[in-house]
Image (cartoon, grey):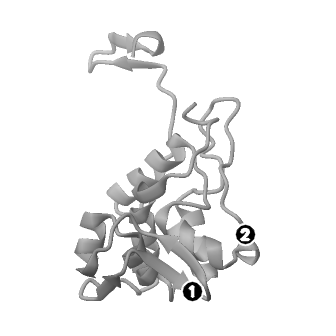
Amino acid sequence: RAISSIYEPGSTFKMFTLTALAKNDLLNENASFYCPGYFEYKGIKTKCPSVHKNLTLAGVLKKSCNTGMITASWNLPVLQFYRALSELGFGQKTDVSLPGEVNGILKKPNQWDIHLKMTIPIGHGIAVTPLQMVTAGNTLANGGRYIQPRIVKEIRNPISERVATNANL
């Protein structure tokens, strides 16, 4: 399932939206966001779990405010957002050495509409595998350095004695 099942990650995806903002010099930690319980653009609404009123960016994360995250990312051009997500491995296989891996779903920029512009920043309108999420998170934790996921055949101690094999890991 880690490579063949896809799901919409929801709020756990917000850290990657922040990464895209930072990569494009649009991350403003001092910005203030007003949340009336929804984000609306041209009559299209995306709900927020609560009415949060005024929040800082840290508050947006703490409260998992959809409105604040959408507002923060609204001026990020679709092409730059797409590139940042692609560079983290979304929409493509990790190339782990297992059969059955799927790409997930990250639509091309020319397929994004207002609905996707509002929902992808909060982890909807995109589908990922669990391994893609772990790999992207690992890239962030390693300062932007991608580490290819691998299947462990066995673990050996310093004197080359087998400690564990794939069957009992």
Quarter containing the N terminus: top right
Residue 127 in picture, x, y percent from top left: 61, 52
Residue 155: name its quadrant. Answer: top left
Inspect this view and state whether residue 89 appears.
Answer: yes
Q: CA distance from mark 2 to mark 1?
A: 21 Å
- Look at the picture and state if 134 lies above or below 58: above
Residue of label 2: 108
**Residue at (50, 52) in percent of width and height:** 9
Residue sitting nearer the eye, 168 or 17: 17
Q: Amino acid at mark 2?
A: Lys
Residue 3: name its quadrant. Answer: top right
**Residue at (43, 79) in percent of width and height:** 21
Residue of label 1: 41
Inspect this view and state whether residue 139 appears.
Answer: no
Residue 123 in picture, x, y percent from top left: 50, 60
- Look at the picture and state if 72 lies above or below 20: below
Quarter containing the C terminus: top left
Mark positioned earlier in the residue sequence (2 or 1): 1
Residue sitting nearer the eye, 84 or 33: 33
> Crowding at label 2, few (<14), some or many (≥20) Cα neighbours within 10 Å?
few
33 left or right of 147?
A: left
Q: Amino acid at mark 1?
A: Tyr
**Residue at (50, 85) in percent of width and height:** 74
132 left or right of 142?
A: right
